[in-house]
Image (tube, rainbow, N blue to C red):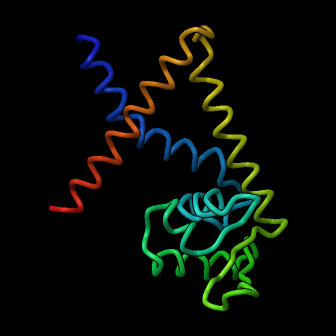
Amino acid sequence: MNDREVINDILVHLFNDIMALEEAAIIDKKYEDISNSEMHVLDAVGPEGGNMSTIAAKLRITMGSLTTAMNRLVLKGYVERNRSETDRRVVNITLTEKGLLAYERHRKFHMRMVDAALKDVSEDQVPVLVNMLTNLKTFFYQYEKVRTKE
């Protein structure tokens, strides 16, 4: 295989591998009541919290899908909803203590993943890797915009 084929093979398999390994690493007895998708919602809320529309935009999901996820997360005790004092139409979301613990567990997994990716990479190679990943992210964002206009 040439380098392009190797990169393609890695990218094709990487997403599924990450999702499966992430779920196995994060969802244990303590967090068996939460799905990997719900964990990503907690990640989008983050320690600083946010309003529903901002969180939906981060996740690139509809407000309806986010509302469904938030209903489950509120019932499970991971997040709290609060109406804005200045604009009652705005619903702000914050993580509870339980939500913060789950968020931190998820973040630690991601940092271990980044550390593993950078294990044999020299400091002068890091900007190249960042550039490559940024280009890939840009490709996906542009592809999505074109696809949704069709």
Q: Which of 19 and 28 is in front in this view?
A: 19
Vertical comparison of 135 with 16: above or below: above
Determine the residue positioned at 81% across, 65% down.
98
Q: Please state the horizontal and vertical placement of residue 63, each as a whole percent of the image.
A: 47, 78
In the image, farthest residue toward the left: 150
Quadrant in the rendering for residue 67 = bottom right
* Residue 144 rendering spot, x and y as whole percentages: 29, 53
Instruction: Choose top left, top right, bottom left or bottom right for residue 35.
Output: bottom right
Whether residue 99 sits left or right of residue 6 in the image: it is right
- Residue extending furthest toward the right: 97
Q: Is residue 138 above or below residue 46?
A: above
Instruction: Count every numbered label the image shows and give the total.
Output: 0
Q: In this view, does 147 lie to the left or right of 17?
A: left
Q: Which residue lies furthest to the front in this view?
A: 86
Where is residue 83 drawn, in percent x and y?
A: 71, 87
Residue at image location 67% in from the left, 32% down from the top: 112
Q: Which of 75 and 28 is in front in this view?
A: 75
Taking 102 as reference, is 21 above or below it?
above
Q: Is residue 142 left or right of residue 36?
A: left
Residue visible at 61% across and 23% down? Answer: 116
Residue found at x 23% / y 12%: 1
Quarter of the picture holding the C terminus:
bottom left
Image coordinates of residue 70 in percent, x first then y, are: 61, 77
Q: Outermost residue, bottom direction?
A: 88
On screen, residue 90 above or below 6: below
